[in-house]
Image (spheres, rainbow, N blue to C red):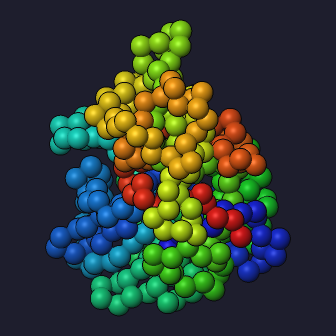
Amino acid sequence: MKAVAGEVPADDDGWAFEIKWDGMRVTSILGGDEPVAVSTNGRDVLGRFPELRPLSDHLHGHPVTLDGEIVVLDDRGRSDFGRLQPRMQAGSDAAVARLLAEGPATYVVFDLLAIGDLPTVELPYLERRRLLADLLQDGPTWRVPEHRVGGGHDLFEAAARAGLEGIMAKRIDSPYLPGRRSSSWRKCKIRQRQELVVGGWTRGDGARGSTLGALHVGYHDPASPGSPLRYAGRVGSGFTDAALDRLVAQLEPLEVDECPFDPPPPAELARTSRWVRPELVAEVAFANWTDAGNVRAPVYLGLRDDRDPATVVREPTP
């Protein structure tokens, strides 16, 4: 189930509120003989996040289907998408073991979809949360986050003061709607951010003259599945040295002659750009959307290999 982006509801007595976690969405079946954990685009992530296996043991052979977010926490207990990046990109068991030793990830479980073969998706949110709290106690690498009914504006202000991404608002009577985006769930962001598809790049200037200067990014029309990739501007800040090296290594094998954006960006940009197959998805924070449909003051946060580029759209609002 996916949320729409929007403001904190004014009539918040009918809503429950949670902190919005900054990580990778993962649906899992844990507690049975063969644990399963998959990302939003259907990739098996259990090998990259073996921290989920102790949770499966915690359930003592009672399989449950869970929805949550895998995060890496900073020293203040806040989820940090940048710290999660190496785990998402880990390509070998040795790399996973090394990164695990440096600091484990945490599975933040916020919904319960089934107990054994009995689905719970039609139950209201508050009943699913009550069952989830009864089933799971917080462990070393997993937790069930708190929620509150009402008081959304106070929680949003507290999240802003703590430097968090935002909060989630969920109607207390809402069922879980698998595979659907619903206004019964609302993500209330302190700063705007979303996934965008990488369609090209330019070389940098000065100290970055030998590496990447900016990414060209875009999105698909949410009203037209399979629509062309619409240009959303350039992202030229937020890169660490390691991210620059990693991006150049991933972009160069994807280069193509034809621009993937329709319509193409301005000609003066096209002359200095290198186009790529639109296979990479970047998470980007930004100030707002311009009238032309570009992101203003964008900042690169990381790559998302848990997203299918064909499904990346400009996120709808209520």
Where does the image place residue 56, in percent across and percent down from the top left?
27, 67
Q: Is residue 36 left or right of residue 276?
A: left
Q: Quadrant of the C terminus?
A: bottom right
> Can I make out residue 147 in this image?
no
- Does 71 appear above or below 57? above
- Does 179 appear above or below 137? below
State the residue in front, 172 or 143.
Answer: 172
Q: Residue at image x 37%, y 27%?
A: 248
Q: Residue at image x 64%, y 77%?
A: 184
Where does the image place residue 220, in percent across and percent down from the top left?
53, 58
State the residue in front, 224 or 72.
Answer: 224
- Does 35 appear above or below 142? below
Q: Residue at image x 77%, y 70%?
A: 9
> Can I make out residue 48 in this image?
yes
Where does the image place residue 311, in percent across and percent down from the top left?
45, 61
Q: Is residue 304 left or right of residue 45?
A: right
- Does 126 appear above or below 302? below
Residue found at the far right of this picture: 10
Q: Is residue 288 left or right of residue 116?
A: right
Q: Quadrant of residue 295?
A: top right
Where does the image place residue 287, in percent across and percent down from the top left?
71, 42
Residue found at the far top of this picture: 206
- How many numbered callouts? 0
Q: Residue at image x 34%, y 37%?
A: 256
